Amino acid sequence: MGRPFKGMGDFYIPAAKLKSTLGGTVSTLDTETLQKLLGGVTAAEVEAELAADRERFDGAAEVADALRRSVRLGLALRRWIERGKLAAFTFNFLDMRKSAGHLTVPFLEASKAMARGTGYAGEGDVLTALLVGAVAAGNEQTTFTEMFCPNWEDGTVYLSHMGEVNWRLLEGRGLLREMDYKYSATDNPALVTGRFRPGEIVLVNLAPVTESGYRLILAPATMLPVTGTDKMEGSVRGWFRPRLALPDFLSAYSRLGGTHHLAMTYAESTETLETFARLSGWETVVIQ
């Protein structure tokens, strides 16, 4: 949905190259199709989805209007995904415009799609969206994520993103909140926020390293519990500790060409993912 995000060249793969190197076909959701899909969403479907959201998330009553438009757009996108048998989807939030049928930005449906096993990545990243879908096909405890910043004092990395997460991986119930959205001409979205639950994880990145080749970078790590006050409440967040010392980990990841978008999966062996890479014809490097 929308154009590839300008300036994010680390993960950018033209559609023709994605097809020739990975076999993935990119479909674009045009305005006419979206309008037809929205027209097919019934009031009963919206009410049923709202009832389900009230059951699985906290905060629905406080974001009622934003939630309703997010649900309606989400159901239209879900139908597009199901009818097209799409393995994954992505959107550029800068291209979400109400005049084009984007009632809001579909952060909420991205979170729900990943919880159903559909691949997703932000900002028009078709490469990582396909990767998330492939990893999720073998392990449903998978999400899209992004390394935001290091904490040098305790050797951890803060994970976050604007508003997309596989909500089944959160500690406790996800919290719905309304985003004060100012990046494009559409209305405020509802999104799910929460903290990743503690546990053993593997960060998974597919990096384009030659004209037609890829490197799968695997980094086993530990998602940490939070002690004391969580000062990032109201966002998608988590803190992990890599196996290597933090400077060595970040240096290795950078030298290997790792991109800034990743898949993250719980309770998965690097051996399984190495087999996936070998079958795909990719080089694999484990950072540990």
Image (tube, rainbow, N blue to C red):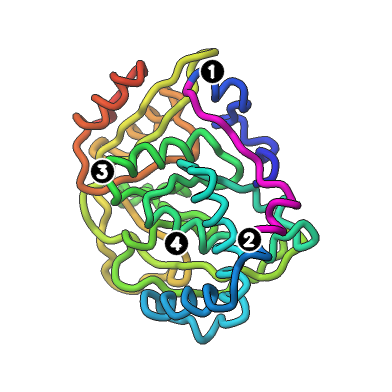
Q: Reading the chain from its start, which is encountered first: label 4 or label 2?
A: 2
Residue at figure coordinates x 66%, y 46% from the top left: 29
Q: Nearer the viewer, mark 1 or mark 3?
A: 1
- Residue 212, given in percent of the width and then of the height, sits at 51, 14
Cα separation, mark 1 vs mark 3, equals: 33 Å
Q: Find disc 4 in the rendering and name its residue.
A: 236
Q: Nearer the viewer, mark 2 or mark 3?
A: 2
- Residue 112, given in percent of the width and then of the height, sits at 44, 60
- Residue 171, given in percent of the width and then of the height, sits at 29, 67
Q: Amino acid at mark 3?
A: Ala
Q: Find disc 3 in the rendering and name its residue.
A: 221
Residue at figure coordinates x 28%, y 65% from the top left: 226
**Residue 161 as seen in the image, left or right of residue 159:** right
Q: Is residue 257 visible?
A: yes
As rendered, which of 84 and 191 lies closer to the eye?
A: 84
**Residue 267 as seen in the image, left or right of residue 281:** left
Cα separation, mark 1 vs mark 4, equals: 35 Å
Q: Which residues are magenta?
A: 22-37
Q: Find disc 1 in the rendering and name its residue.
A: 20
